[in-house]
Image (cartoon, rainbow, N blue to C red):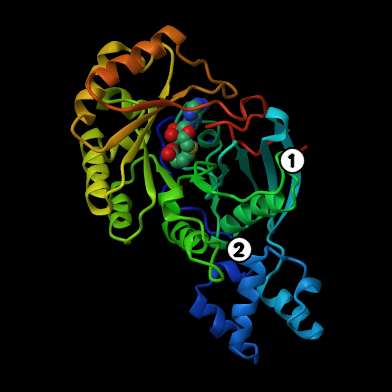
Amino acid sequence: MPKPGELTFAAPRRAKPPRHLADLSPAERREAVAALGEKPFRAGQLSRHYFTRLADDPAQWTDMPAALRERLATELMPALMTSVRDIACDDGATRKTLWKLFDGTLVESVLMRYPDRATMCVSSQAGCGMNCPFCATGQAGLTRNLSTAEIVEQVVAGARALQRGEVPGGPGRVSNIVFMGMGEPLANYKAVLGAVRRITDPSPDGLGISQRSVTISTVGLVPAMEKLAEEGLSCTLALSLHAPDDELRDTLVPVNTRWPVREVLDAAWHYEARTGRRVSIEYALIKDINDHAWRADLLGKRLRNHNAHVNLIPLNPTPGSKWTASTQQRQDEFVRLLEAHGVPVTVRDTRGRDIDGACGQLAAADAG
Ligand code: SAH
């Protein structure tokens, strides 16, 4: 367990997961197939099976000779994870899956279906090194980075469940992706960027989900935020602010001691300027900790005149934490004060709270 405030940026070195089609760019896939002595066009067929048809069973790849199917499956589509457990709530509309990776590492992902969309919340790391004291994932420390394919596979699994009609509401598709599961996505930059490409590249190279429907949430790693702004993407950036002043944010989001509020907001405005995308500011409302009227005012002052919107998250309970969500009255007042500054505000729903699948509750520790 990390000590309070301790930060871990570099993930421990571990054995790498086996190479998978979803780790590779379209050009790398052709090279990989050619290196196996096969015609490069097979890479396109394989991509169509995986990304477009979501067909993971080689028996369904009828445009290839049977022996080749087996070979390509072994070489380029090894099983990367197995589902240990699925728990659902909201009459099946919210579903949390616990995954066991090739080396026994556990991670979780959450699928949330709404009348008009289906959102997949994915993990980018096993554990997290950012140590925010109100987040369950942060308390266990960082186990390792996930590979691009390990991230993409979480999305594909959700897409398959919807395609096969396993989620109440009839067959459907994943429309939105949020990097809000376990881990700090910008601390695993390369793998996350690869996953964003696979998720958003049009079919058959990728899943063809709109970049605008992909949200990357960060504690505020400024150099990585600046790099992300230059990638030519139109993804949404979400910044976990949680306090408008350095004194409090130093304790709630310990990485603030490296990159304080002013710098992290400047990086958010830079992202906004480069991409034209409205930035989302996440603020978990914690009773008597960060829910004061003067903090709402300071937040409003810092955000007004910027293309930002505040997403208030009623604090979800985590094991061993003494903190609770703000009262309804305080929450309403916080909303009112921000709106008085002309800052748009929404309150995030608490989907998955009863299955420990809501924000900050993913721990993947209780495999049993
Ligand atoms: N590491 C990234 C993504 C993780 S979680 C980040 O911090 O942005 C997504 C959001 O859930 C973050 O804003 C995080 O601060 C918030 N969160 C963590 N624990 C929470 C809790 N107990 N209740 C409500 N929100 C929480």
Q: Quadrant of residue 67?
A: bottom right
Please tell me the numbered disc located at residue 15.
2
Q: Residue at x 58, y 82 (%)?
A: 32
In the rendered image, the quadrant that contains the C terminus is: top right
Which residue is nearer to you in this view: 285 or 40?
Answer: 40
Residue 104 in the image: above or below residue 351: below
In the rendered image, the quadrant that contains the N terminus is: top right
Q: CA distance from mark 2 to mark 1?
A: 27 Å
What is the count of numbered marks?
2
Label 2 vs label 1, nearer the camera: 1
Q: Position of residue 284 (x, y in %)?
A: 43, 25
Q: Residue at x 60, y 86 (%)?
A: 41
Residue 120 lies left or right of residue 68; in this view the side is left
Residue 198 lies left or right of residue 45; in this view the side is left
Q: Residues within 10 Å of mark 2 (few under 14, many from 20)?
A: few
For mark 1, what is the residue? 86
Residue 276 in the image: above or below residue 169: below
Q: Residue at x 62, y 41 (%)?
A: 110
